Image: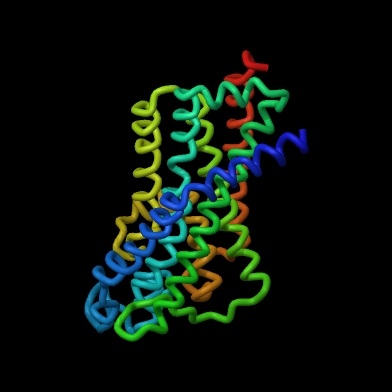
Amino acid sequence: MFRELTALTRREFLKLARNPQAIFTSLLLPLLYLLLFGNGFTFNPQAYVGPGPGQFPTLQLALDFLFRGAPSYYSYFACGMVGFVAVTASLFLGANVIFDKLFGIFKRTRGTPAPSAAVFGARLIAGATQPILLAFFVLGLAVAFAHIPGLNGLHVTASVTPLGAIYVLLAIVLLSGLFATLFLTFGVLLDVPQTYFAAVNLINLPVLLTSDALYPWGTMPAWLQNVSQYNPVSLAVNVLREVLFGSSAYPYGPAVYLLGLLAWTAVLVVIAIVLVRRALRPLE
């Protein structure tokens, strides 16, 4: 199985490398978000500092309340964009499977001696690699913007240790793998593109909108804060923000949030294995 998995994974990477238009557009979208959305929307934490009701005695307490310790909304938003990209970049993985079904490519692949686990695993490895690389591209770009006059950027205010860097890597890999598995499973189970996009939008938008990827934490109503803390996107983004900005605004350390994200990923992978095996069984 390892030989088949390696060969099929190599083929998936070659397909991606031979499509420079897709690479360009995938890089352009987060660039536009960081330039336009992040720079266009601002929240003034100083307005929350003062002696009045609902205000805080110091700016740091206001930052902890609004942005979970981030020094500005842009820094808060930039970490959220890492989670946002990890989700949205995985959307088309299942659609590619459906289109391959329509053109007979998937059937021909299934007609080879390669087991279904290798067929699914190759697409998962290649498909999850793209959002992982995009997430780091977004993170690096946001940090670079901080050194360009006239632009907002991500300012790292904590000392990032080697362990913290490992936490960030694991959070991005787990989140990308989670949603790549989810959308790829939908692609295997469904046959109509319209049905697929309706299903993934039914999941994609609620997941993103109930996370703290984009919304300032302190402006959320209490019920949304309660929902958000169990959201896998929030769990991954919390790890990044704790590592980059410090943990004073968080009740748990990054390892706890990683364990929650790992639990989400493990449950979804088990469900995906059961469903994909059942869906591909007649072809074996």
167 sits left or right of 180 in the view: right
What is the x, y in percent for residue 58?
35, 84
Q: Residue at x 70, y 39 (%)?
A: 7
What is the x, y in percent for residue 45?
29, 77
Q: Looking at the image, which residue sits at the far right?
A: 2
- Using the image, determine if residue 170 lies above or below residue 264: below
What is the x, y in percent for residue 128?
56, 47
In what quadrant of the picture does the N terminus appear? Answer: top right
- Using the image, determine if residue 12 lies above or below residue 26: above
- Using the image, determine if residue 243 lies above or below residue 275: below
Q: Residue at x 68, y 17 (%)?
A: 284
Q: Looking at the image, which residue sits at the far front?
A: 18
What is the x, y in percent for residue 149?
33, 86
- Using the image, determine if residue 177 lies above or below residue 172: above
Residue 8's quadrant in the figure? Answer: top right
Colour scheme in use: rainbow
Can residue 178 be seen in this snapshot?
no
Q: Residue at x 51, y 37 (%)?
A: 182
272 sits left or right of 25 in the view: right
245 sits left or right of 149 in the view: right
